[in-house]
């Protein structure tokens, strides 16, 4: 299974170190950072979740939570969406049959039915009280598959433009 790293080094990716937001993070108790940028003529705008750990001599150190795998990292890399180096290097290659726009709109439909906040970035929510567990499981399964496709397609596209 080919990995993206076989043809690209991490240096080829635009980096987003958490340290760039040091001043902003000093201001208060940030839970996420809003990013907005253009990548290959496509505009992106979303929030990236943060976490913090206590420093030995007081204060906190902030980390990104990778939007794809939730690993705690200090640098994210731009593959369309920002992901951690583990995700950049992850093997991919499953079939991507659905056009990305249709995948996005189906994800959005499912999230509405589940009463979840819009955007894959917000992760999974709870089961609505009125919904049967069977229906809920089916929708969550589909949601998981579709969001995996979104990520793979994003990474795949990046690899193919060279
Ligand atoms: Zn990751």
Image (spheres, helix red, strand yellow):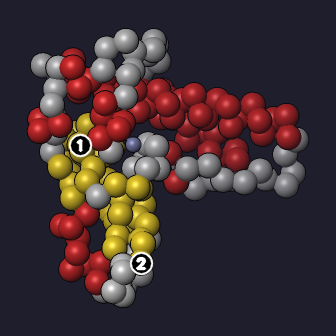
Residue located at (64% from left, 29% from top) = 142
Within the image, what quadrant is residue 74 found in? bottom left
Residue at disc 1, secondary structure = strand
Residue 139 shown left or right of residue 60 in the figure: right
- Where is residue 15? Give x, y as percent: 17, 49
Labels 2 & 1 near each other (Cβ < 8 A): no
Viewer-closest of 152 and 102: 152
Q: Which mark is residue 78?
A: 1
Q: Nearer the viewer, mark 2 or mark 1?
A: 2
**Quadrant where ligand 1 appears:** top left
Within the image, what quadrant is residue 85 found in? top left
Q: Marks 2 and 1, Cα distance to the nearest angstrom?
A: 28 Å
Residue located at (67% from left, 31% from top) = 141
Residue 59 shown left or right of residue 8 in the figure: right
Residue 41 visible, this angle:
no
Circle 1 crowding by C-alpha within 10 Å: few under 14, some 14–19, many from 20: some
Residue located at (25% from left, 78% from top) = 24
Q: Which residue is mark 2?
A: 54
- Where is residue 125? Give x, y as percent: 66, 53
Viewer-closest of 23 and 146: 23
Residue at disc 2, secondary structure = strand
Within the image, what quadrant is residue 48 found in? bottom left
- Where is residue 73? Give x, y as percent: 34, 54
Q: Which mark is residue 11?
A: none
- Where is residue 8? Give x, y as percent: 16, 26
| First-in-chain label (2 vs 1) | 2
Indicate whether 124 appears above or below 63.
above
């Amino acid at each position: 299974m080919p990995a993206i790293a076989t043809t690209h080094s991490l240096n080829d990716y635009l980096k987003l170190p958490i340290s760039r937001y040091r001043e902003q993070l000093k201001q208060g108790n940030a839970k996420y950072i809003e990013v907005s940028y253009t990548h290959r003529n496509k505009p992106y705008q979303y929030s990236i979740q943060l976490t913090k750990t206590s420093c030995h001599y007081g204060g906190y150190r902030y980390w990104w939570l990778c939007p794809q795998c939730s690993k705690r990292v200090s640098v994210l890399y731009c593959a369309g969406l920002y992901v951690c180096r583990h995700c950049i290097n992850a093997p991919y290659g499953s079939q991507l049959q659905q056009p990305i726009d249709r995948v996005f709109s189906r994800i959005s439909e499912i999230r509405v039915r589940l009463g979840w906040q819009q955007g894959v970035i917000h992760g999974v929510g709870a089961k609505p009280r009125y919904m049967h567990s069977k229906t809920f499981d089916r929708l969550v399964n589909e949601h998981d598959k579709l969001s995996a496709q979104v990520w793979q397609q994003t990474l795949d596209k990046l690899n193919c433009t060279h």
